[in-house]
Image (spheres, rainbow, N blue to C red):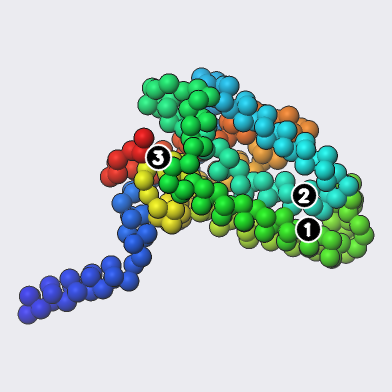
Amino acid sequence: MLFVKHTAHLNGQHGRLMRESPALIESRRFGVRHIPMLRPLGWLARGWTDLMRCPLPGLLHGLALAAFGALLIAVAHQHFWLLAGAFTGFLLVAPILATGLYAVSRALERQQRADLAVALAAWKPRDGRLVVFGLLLALAGTGWVLTSASLITGFAPAPVRGPMDFLRVVVLAETGHLFEIWLALGAFLAAPVFASSVVAIPLLLDRRVSVLAAVLTSWRVVQAHPLPLALWAGLLMVLTVLGMATALLGLVIIAPWLSHASWHAYRDLVDTSAMAELD
């Protein structure tokens, strides 16, 4: 009888494993470390330290993002309905743009040479995993831009050509709930993208793991720590909006600061000891 029960138990385990995808099994090779609620503040502190230790790659990264934002404003300044979606869509693709700075933080952690060459080397295509993930984020960002533009142009009671129009016609509208719907749709898209990418991109840079397994690991991290990562998402959003609100100049510092901090978030949250490092 004991043998029969043991055999049934093994068969049940085998059946469960057969039903699970290879990516989920691969994801479980990474442990999830437990962190306290306020640990995201420590990530900011360590990210700032990395930026001060190796400022050139980060500042160039921030300048490039600010310059892109300025170009976007110059092109679409008469179409704020498009600009609003583009800037919020930027938040979705920002993690992949920070790949080079993750490499710099990794080099600093290993006490290796950390400079602009290290950041640029991270962009050399190896096996296409980061390229695939970047394309997925770009599709998500493009989808939000189109959704945002369609919503505002289709349902705003008056044309939205500038920031004051957006504030008057959308945010402070006396009737309707366009702004609330706009925010809800943005959150509906941003939440799963954040959950899919919060540690996935540093993990893809650091270990040889499939894109789907990295995404599933990211979801496991969020599931294990919903409150600390909600705080982290809030800090990312508030600081990024602050950088945009300072005529984009704040992004020169804030963007690389948050990028370095995101590396430390990954290192604190994911136990990668079961798999060798990816050089």
Name the amino acid, label 1. Answer: Ala
The residue that disc 2 covers is 84
Question: What residue appears at the point 85 percent right and 50 percent down from the top-left corner?
Answer: 79
Name the amino acid, label 2. Answer: Ala
Q: Judging from the image, what secondary structure is the residue with disc 3 in?
A: helix
The residue that disc 1 covers is 149
Q: Judging from the image, what secondary structure is the residue with disc 1 in?
A: helix
Name the amino acid, label 3. Answer: Asp
The picture places residue 76, in percent across and down from the top left corner, at 83, 46
| Residue 206, numbered circle | 3
The picture places residue 256, in percent across and down from the top left corner, at 59, 31
Residues 247 and 137: in front is 137
Residue 43 visible in the shown view: no
Residue 23 visible in the shown view: yes
| Residue 229, numbered circle | none
Mark 2: few, some, or many residues within 10 Å (few <14, many ≥20)? some
Please say if 179 is above or below 93.
below
Structural distance between the alpha carbons of marks 2 and 1 = 8 Å
Q: Nearer the viewer, mark 3 or mark 2?
A: 3
